[in-house]
Image: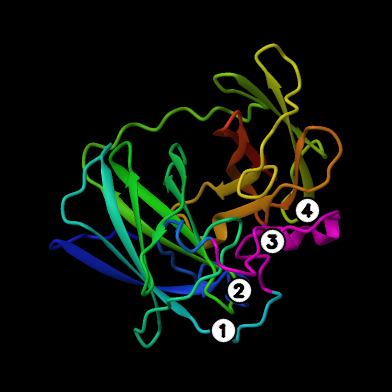
Amino acid sequence: MKHILLGMFVGATLLVSPGCSSTKPGEVNVANGETSSQLEKQEGKSMSDSQDGHSMEQMNHDTHTMENMNHEDNSRTTTEAKLKAPKKLAANQQINLVINIQDTAGKPVNKFDIFQGKLMHLIVVSNDLEHFDHLHPDYKENGRFEVSAKFPTPGEYTLFSDYKPTGQKESLSLTNISIPGSVPLPKNLSKYEETKTLSDTKVNLNLSAPTIKAGKDIKLTFDLKDNKNQTIKDLQPYLGEKGHLLIIKSSSPLTASDYIHAHAIKNTTGENIEFHTNFPKSGTYKMWMQFKHNGKIKTADFWVNVE
């Protein structure tokens, strides 16, 4: 879906389904946003949805997709997300975005719970999945979130917004934005490499099965070594966990059902970062595994093929 942005600010109204609802895949439209530092001190808020000692049967409570959230009730209020962006958009420049969360009557939803350390998580990807960013919009009260995002090249982008209105389940929404200009030719896929080398870290991906099967649970293990090929043993928590794994299926257009967010298994032995997850459909997926080391957030990306 392309938005033509007119005037100084143009709002796009988007219906947002709760992240864990009986909404069918593909029926959710998405909003943009980022996190608040001022409300992170709310009492009684959970830093993470993950539980200790997960089994493969428990995996669906730790992996968020629109297809594995159908076990929840649908009695909650549906929200609307209205996106505002400047009239003039350009690649590789900071662009200020506003997202207003409202109920279906148009009244602001003004109370949100912290989850995974933030009030809102915003995942920004280009539609060819070459660009990835994980942002946390600032909450400005009265249902208004603000964030500054940079889109490196012209083309189409999808923004996955994740937030939790107080008293409701986690909600996932998405929107699209088009950056004008000459769209670059697509890069060659880094065909299913099992090792990603960052500036000072080598990340190896290991699968619990020789191939990934659609609809089947699988364990993904990431082994981290420094530039001396020594196992890294001093990882720091990132958003309350050992690591986060964002997965998006290569599709056109991207939809909410293409989005998977897996949490690292807690209390695992060794220094590896492990995830249990499930790829609902066959196809090509891109994964971004994020972790914190030496005070810096690092991202290792991998393409995988699901049969």
Determine if the magenta segment contains residue 64: yes
- Is residue 259 or residue 95 the one in the foreground? 95
Q: Which residue is mark 4?
A: 216
Q: Which residue is mark 3?
A: 49
| Residue with the most extreme left position | 7
- In the image, residue 184 lies at what x, y percent? 31, 33
Q: Which residue is mark 1?
A: 76
Alpha carbons under labels 2 and 4: distance apart = 25 Å
Q: In the image, is 26 to the left or to the right of 60?
A: left
Q: Which residue is mark 2?
A: 169
The disc, 4 or 1, on the residue closer to the chain's N-terminal end is 1
Circles 2 and 1 in contact, beta carbons < 8 Å: yes
Q: Residues within 10 Å of mark 4 (few under 14, many from 20)?
A: few
- Circle 1: element type: loop
Q: In the image, is 144 to the left or to the right of 64?
A: left
What's the amino acid at mark 3?
Answer: Asp
Question: Can residue 193 be seen in the rendering of this structure?
Answer: yes
What's the amino acid at mark 4?
Answer: Lys
- Circle 4: element type: loop
At 44% from the left edge and 46% from the top edge, which residue is drawn?
125
Quarter-of-image position of residue 274:
top right
For the stretch drawn in magenta, the main secondary structure is loop
Q: Magenta stretch: give its range.
A: 41-70
Q: Is residue 117 above or below residue 73?
A: above
Q: Is residue 266 above or below residue 109?
A: above
Alpha carbons under labels 2 and 1: distance apart = 8 Å
Q: Residues within 10 Å of mark 3 (few under 14, many from 20)?
A: some
